[in-house]
Amino acid sequence: MGPGDLAHVLRHLATQETPAALLVGLQTADDAAVWRLDAERALVQTVDFFTPIVDDPYTYGAIAAANSLSDVYAMGGTPFLALAIAGFPTAVSKDVLAEIFRGGADVAAEAGVVIAGGHTVMDDEPKYGLCVTGMVHPDRILTKAAARAGDVVFLTKPVGTGIITTALKRELAQPEHVDAAVTSMRTLNRAAGVLLAEHPGVRACTDVTGFNVPVDDTVAVMGPRSTFAVR
């Protein structure tokens, strides 16, 4: 759903009184919510899922998990706990879903994140992602809202994966391009998160997720699945 449509759907929720402990919520439309626990700790909470963008179920699960975890890294946090969320067709072998879960679990384990449970529903099209919880210091939260005109932008991954995955769906992509895009999308943004923590001048960050906009029988693709920081 685009930003305009989402703002319309959430317009009533956004006017609700905000508790003092809610440091980041609907008002700034950021990558995750942040809830202060005490002077030294705040919880980062996010949920993210999408339909398959590659054919291999294991790879799809790995990409989806890395994408979900990126929301926490983009807020300056460290993820530690996750719940899986999935929709799956009844006509497709459950072994396919098992491979999706295995791909997600392997990436979560690489990040030091425990998948402790989740929820599944039957759906006509596969969907998979994670609800992720992380931790951040209340004084080191990074948000999109903190970006200002004239800031310097640092991209931590190459742009263009959305173009390649769209070409893949249309059977137009070159194998070497698909391999490079898959490697990028399933790579955790943890290293970028560590670098951000080492540079206190960084104040804004987001993970840019690709989306497709149909235009006159063509597809305009915006954004990679990567993290960028601004300072």
Image: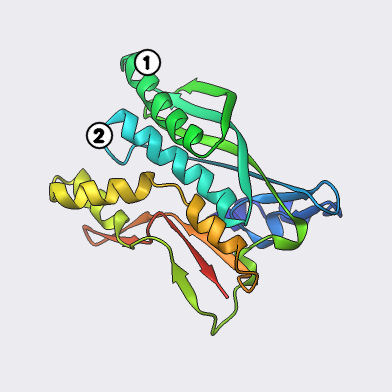
Q: Is residue 143 above or below residue 230?
A: above
Q: Residues within 10 Å of mark 1 (few under 14, many from 20)?
A: few
User: Secondary structure under badge 1?
Assistant: loop
State which tag comes first along the sequence, 1 or 2: 2
Q: Label 2, on which residue?
A: 55
Residue type, numbered disc 2: Asp
* Image side of residue 82 versus residue 169, left or right: right
Residue visible at 62% across and 57% down?
76
* Image side of residue 18 versus residue 120, left or right: right
Image quarter hosting the C terminus:
bottom right
Q: Report the disc number at residue 90.
A: 1
Residue 4 placement (x, y as % from top left)? 54, 61
Q: Residues within 10 Å of mark 2 (few under 14, many from 20)?
A: few
User: Secondary structure under badge 2?
Assistant: loop
Q: Is residue 133 above or below residue 148?
A: above
Between disc 1 and disc 2, the foreground one is 2
Q: Residue furthest bottom?
A: 150
Residue type, numbered disc 1: Thr
